[in-house]
Amino acid sequence: MYGHVKQIIGLSALVVLFGCAEPPPPAPVKKLYHGRTVHDFEAASLAAASYQVERGDTLYSIAFRANVDVRELAQLNNISEPYLIFPGQRLRLKAVEKSSKSVAKTSQTGYRDTKLEQKQSKPVTPKTAATPVASKPPATVISSPSNEPFAKEVQWRWPATGKVIRDFSTAEAGNKGLDIGGDRGAPIYAAAAGKVVYAGNALKGYGQLIIVKHNDDYISAYAHNQTLLVQEQQWVKQGEVIAEMGDTDAAQVMLHFEIRFRGKSVNPRHYLPRG
């Protein structure tokens, strides 16, 4: 009986000893990667020499991200209007620079041909001019009129009525447009008349995006919308409601608005009316 009690007392002491021991340090917590956010993408996010088309891409959206003129991109890849592309297609984003090489005439032996140089240095006696042959006039090229009523001069208006919360920046990683704050569901207006060439959410970092082509030089972009109210290839008038303000791929409710001139981002304040 005494021995049994002694064993119980000994086990209790071990429990107390281990219970008072300091617990081992917790395993280090590793930072989890949740994917890219809007801050990982800028307007000119495609800096590589080529790009593989993904589902939902259009040539306009790729040119928008590569910060190049869609016409130059189409010509570079031998793509004609209406600029159809397909997933998996590899597009060149930059032209291959050809190094200029001076071509020198040498003899087959590789040595300088002094006789040839002397002949080239002597003045050439002009021969009697022959009777000129009448050349045919160049053929007149008649181009068919375009059925796209793009205006030569674009008239601009503000795309939303909110306050500018982030301005345009010329820095390499700066804001390539204007961020306009507002209420969720507030109307987004077409800043100028044109054709919708992109409407979707395939461009990461822009959320629900609309791109409108106004003429051969200008396009405008409307990002982070909650709802898109227009479709691709649809014509819109200036001031027409094309979307509802939202926060898709954004930290807050706002409209990210850009104007591109021949593929390059420009400051929208230089085009929008003051006030």
Image (spheres, rainbow, N blue to C red):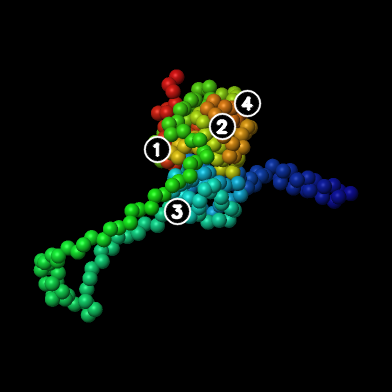
Crowding near the residue tagged with mark 2, few <14, some 14–19, many ≥20 C-alpha atoms within 10 Å: many
Judging from the image, what secondary structure is the residue with disc 4 in?
loop
Q: Nearer the viewer, residue 6 or 103?
A: 103
Q: Comparing marks 2 and 1, which lies closer to the viewer?
A: 2
Q: Comparing marks 3 and 2, which lies closer to the viewer?
A: 2
Crowding near the residue tagged with mark 1, few <14, some 14–19, many ≥20 C-alpha atoms within 10 Å: few
Q: Quick one: label 1 or label 4, which is nearer the N terminus?
A: 1
Amino acid residing under circle 2? Val
- The residue at which mark 2 appears reads as 236
Q: Comparing marks 1 and 3, which lies closer to the viewer?
A: 3
- The residue at which mark 4 appears reads as 185
Crowding near the residue tagged with mark 3, few <14, some 14–19, many ≥20 C-alpha atoms within 10 Å: some
Q: Would residue 94 be visible to someone looking at this image?
A: yes
Judging from the image, what secondary structure is the residue with disc 1 in?
loop
Q: Comparing marks 1 and 4, which lies closer to the viewer?
A: 4
Residue 76, which numbered label?
3
Q: CA distance from mark 1 to mark 3?
A: 28 Å
Q: CA distance from mark 4 to mark 3?
A: 40 Å
**Residue closest to the far right:** 1
Please name the residue shown 32% across and 60% down the image: 99
Q: Quick one: label 4 or label 2, which is nearer the N terminus?
A: 4
